[in-house]
Every structure is written in structure tokens, then in C-alpha cells.
Amino acid sequence: MDTIRKSDATRRQANLVDYDQFYAGFHWEDAERLLDGLPGGKLNIAFEAIDRHVIQGRGDRIAIRWISKDGPRLDFSYAELLRETNRFANVLKGLGIARGDRVYSLLGRVPELYVAALGTLKYGAVFCPMFSAFGPEPVKARMEIGGARVLVTSHSLYRKKVAPWRKELAGLGAVLLIDGDEAEADTDTHDLSKLMAEAGPRFSIAATDPEDMALLHFTSGTTGRPKGAVHVHRAVVAHHLTGQLALDLHPDDVFWCTADPGWVTGTSYGIISPLTNGVTMIVDEAEFDAGRWYGILESEKVNVWYTAPTAIRMLMKAGPELAKDHDLSRLRFMASVGEPLNPEAVAWGDRTFGMPFHDNWWQTETGGIMIANYASMDVKPGSMGKPLPGITAGIVEKHDGMVREISRPMTIGQLALKPGWPSMMRAYLHEEERYRKCFVGDWYLSGDLAMRDADGYFWFVGRDDDVIKSAGHLIGPFEVESALMEHPAVAEAAVIGIPDETIGEVVKAFVALKPGYEGSDELMLDLLGHARKRLGPAVAPKEVAFRNNLPKTRSGKIMRRLLKARELGLPEGDISTLESDER
Ligand code: ATP
Ligand code: MG
């Protein structure tokens, strides 16, 4: 697919005008200087996100515009957010919570979630967000692993998901309900709004050390049991910088990150980065709905939009006409993360919005964006872009227990990063061995396979576990899925390898169709023919199965391992984060 060129005007208005020059001269100390810090070399994420803007006279600017499920909106200025988060910190103080204690949330995207997250960080406690649709078991498991001391949740979520086993979690000192008072039933359950009303609006922010633990994030569980990644206050340096460079946030922007804070994207870029950059961020309480989303982009005059491939594919499925009905002229930059972004989706963005989606790559472990397509840089559809300034990325292979870099362009290897950036995880909680294994020689190994082209652009191939070995070829599912996505009937595709005695593995595709198409033998042959023409017989799938839906994590990632387990009649493994399960 052709490269999408950027005009000189687009380049000039980008924060990162000349990538190569900036990359060559960059030091992380430069990024630290973009923040204010606290006296004595201390650093606190919440101070950088809120208080410093108020101190510098920007307290009236809207920090969060919250759109409720039913429509009414609520605005919080930076000054209001300062007071609310101070109150929350005082609530923790009143409960006798210690610094470093773990404060969990189990909430939908309601204002209390944002206040609790930032108030916890102000207090110097550790925040751990959980996705509200988790069942009781995943909630309990995560709270046990992290040693939850406080839980902020709602009455109904508490009743369904926590009350049945609460007594088994001895360390859980307090449950704060945002919408109800269970205090009579249990002395450790409190009405948060009452405590907030009684708490003072002033709080002396905790002088946290940059290396103090700030956040605990569980991975998506796409490849197996979720891991708890530990992040520290210093991560804010990367959140702030990547917001400027990879998301191109300008001070007057309205920014919408559609991710839920239950996943790392929804915290790093749905709370911290936009606020440290002083923009107005949109929070939508409701779930995905194509019409609603276009409505929000239009009415809130969103300038920068950060979303995910699944959502983009759903918008594509809904058709471009819906987009054309809206005035989206305020949009300046669109980015995507979480899964490989098919070239077709990038091109669709360009046709529909007049600008491409800018793919970027990172993980819960990396805490922030590592590889990105920048506003000023030409986009090669299907590529994740180039490493952030301050990030050394390489394609490596293991050899005799060592790791060496592959310099030949377009050669598949493990995507690796040189450790040392501020938002790198400091541990997998209670899993030291697993953490240690991520590092070999000078490199952190991501577990993803990729290639780098001669221009330095990185291309995702597949997760290590998902790559298919067939007749001596290494086949990346992404390439095959992207080819299938080009077919007009295909809404989504997932590809796996099925063991085969002769050639190792054969490629099998699972396909969900766009509205108006029916799975038939004829369509199957057409898809196989299309794939063979695009990819050649060695790489094209040998079989296509139609599905109404593909199994996905709640963060929207296709679970290929589950398709494979089901296909082969193997145990399904950890499915705590599984969302759609319609076959
Ligand atoms: P688990 O580690 O529990 O199996 P997970 O890896 O899906 O789950 P996350 O940390 O949320 O958990 O996701 C990071 C992974 O998502 C990356 O390692 C990569 O496989 C995939 N990913 C993220 N962004 C991109 C992208 N732009 N292109 C391709 N893959 C991506
Ligand atoms: Mg992972």
C-alpha cells in the first residue's frame, strides 16, 4: 500500500518537526525538565497532572469533560480537580491508610474513578484500576495478588463481585462505595460521598521519590494469565513526553482516549498524559456505539483522538456514510494502539477523515508508547512507525543463550528494547523469575516478533506464541489477516496454525463478515483465492471458518490462543479477560 505523505503545513504544526534530528540529540534529562518536580528531587504524578497547572494560573481550564451514559455532561476544571483529589487524599488519611498501600478501583468510567486515581497518587499510595466488567473471580485474584487495602467501587458492583468473598481477603481494610451506604452492615464499608464532604480541600502532596511505586497494572491476558506490572512515579516523564511527541498534544487541544482505565492505555493516556500536558480530556461513560462516537467527535470538537483497531474495524463495518454526516473538521491527529492496525484501516482513515490513523506500539510492561507514527512523518500503512526519542528498539535473535541484533532489513526477529526509560515496569509483582527472563544481555525482550525496514520503520509480525511455522516459512498472522481484511466481505479476521505432520503447521483463518454477507462455500473459495493471489500458496490459509464474532479480551484484543485451544480440543487456559464469546 502506498506511503501516505505529510504536507509541509502538517509537518510545521507538529510538536516533533524533525524526527531524526530530535532523536539524535535527545536525553531523558531534557524530558524531566519539561516537568516541575517537587523540592529535593522528589516527583509525584498527580502534582504534575494537576497542581502545577493551578499554581501556574491555568486552574480555570477544563481538565475533564465527562459525558454520562444518558447524555448530560459534567466539567471539572483543573482547580476543581485539585480540590477533589485533595479531598480523596484526606479520606485515605482519615482511614489510616499508609503510603505505599494499594488502592483498587472497580468502577465504570465515572468521575469518582479519576478522582480516586489521582487522589491516591497524591497521597503516595499505589493505584490499581480494575475493569468493571470482570467477574468476581478475576476481581478477587487481582486484589489478592496486589494485597488490596482499599477498594473504591459502586454499590451494585460490590454486591455482585466483592461481597460474596470479602471476608476471605483479610487485608482489605476499607471499601468506599460511590453511591450507597452499607455502613450499617459492615463497619469497614463507607459512603464515599459522605467522607468526601467531610474531608478538607487542602492536602500537602506526598513527597514521593521518583522510584516509589505508583501504579499496578495487570496485562490484558491475551497470551495467558495476566501479570501485574509495577510502575513508579518517574513514569510520568515518559507519559508527558510521549503525549507531546507521539500523540502531538498541544496545550489548547481537546483529546479523547477511548480506552478504559482498567487497561494501561486508559490510565497512561486516558488520565496522566493528557493532564500533565494541560489539555481538556473527554471521558465517555458509555460503551462503543458508532453514531455516538461520531457525535462526540463533532460536538466536543475533538482535536486528537486515540483509539484501538477493534473500534476502528467496527467503525469501518458501520460504513463511511455515518462519518460523512458529521462535521469532523476539528480533528487534527488520530492514533491507534493495542493490536496490529491493518493497512486497510489506515487507508480507510485517510479516505474517511482526510488523515491516516497513526499506529503506535507499546505494552503494559513499557508503561508508555515506544514505537510510533508521528504527525510530521510519512505513514507506511501497516507499519508501527519508529522508536520514540530516548528509546532504542531492535530486532534481535537468540543465539547460544545470548541475544544479537539482526541488522538485515525486513528480517523477522524478536522486538526488543534497551532498558532504561522512565516508564519501564520495575517488576512483575511476586513473579521475579518471569520478570528476570524478560531481560537477556542488553535487551528487554517484548515477546512480539517484528521486522525493521531499510528506512527504520518497524513492522509487526505477530506475538511469539502466535507465529505459524509452515514448510520452513515463518508466517505472521498479521500479514495474512491484513490480506483477508482487504476483501470487501471481511469485517475481522484471525489466523492460527494447525499442527500438520508434513509441513509443521497449516494456516487456518477465522473470519467475521460485514453486514449483508453470508458465509457460504462460494465465499470461502473466493476468500481462499483472494488470499492466495495476495500472499502466495505457501502463506495463504488452507481453510476459512466463518464466525459471528471472534473471541476477544475486554481490552479488544483477538485471543488467537483460544481459537487454537478450541480447534484442537485443548484446555482454554485463563479466560478471565475474555469478552465476546459468541461462536
Ligand atoms: P498478556 O501479556 O497478558 O498476554 P497483552 O500482551 O495483550 O496480554 P497488553 O500489555 O495490554 O497485554 O498488550 C501489549 C501487546 O499488545 C503487545 O505486546 C502487542 O502484542 C500488542 N500490541 C500493542 N500495540 C500494538 C500495535 N500497534 N501493533 C501490534 N501489536 C500491538
Ligand atoms: Mg503481553
Image: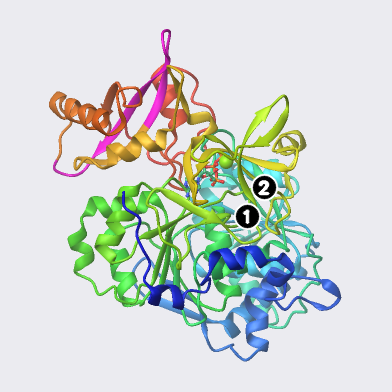
The furthest residue to the right: 40
**At 69% across and 75% down in the image, what residue appears?**
47
Marks 2,1: beta carbons within 8 A: yes
Residue 87, horizontal then vertical, whole percent: 67, 76
| Viewer can see residue 112 | no
Q: Which residue is mark 2?
A: 229
Most foreground residue, 329 or 257: 329
Q: Does label 2 point to a residue whose CB lies under 8 Å from ligand 1?
A: yes
Question: Left or right: where does residue 302 sit relative to residue 364?
Answer: left
What stretch of residues is rendered in magenta? Answer: 495-516
Residue 188, horizontal then vertical, whole percent: 70, 57
User: Type of residue at label 2?
Assistant: Ala
Q: Which disc number belongs to residue 367? A: 1
**At 58% across and 88% down in the image, what residue appears?**
58
The quadrant holding residue 183 is bottom right
Closer to the chain start, of discs 2 and 1, is 2
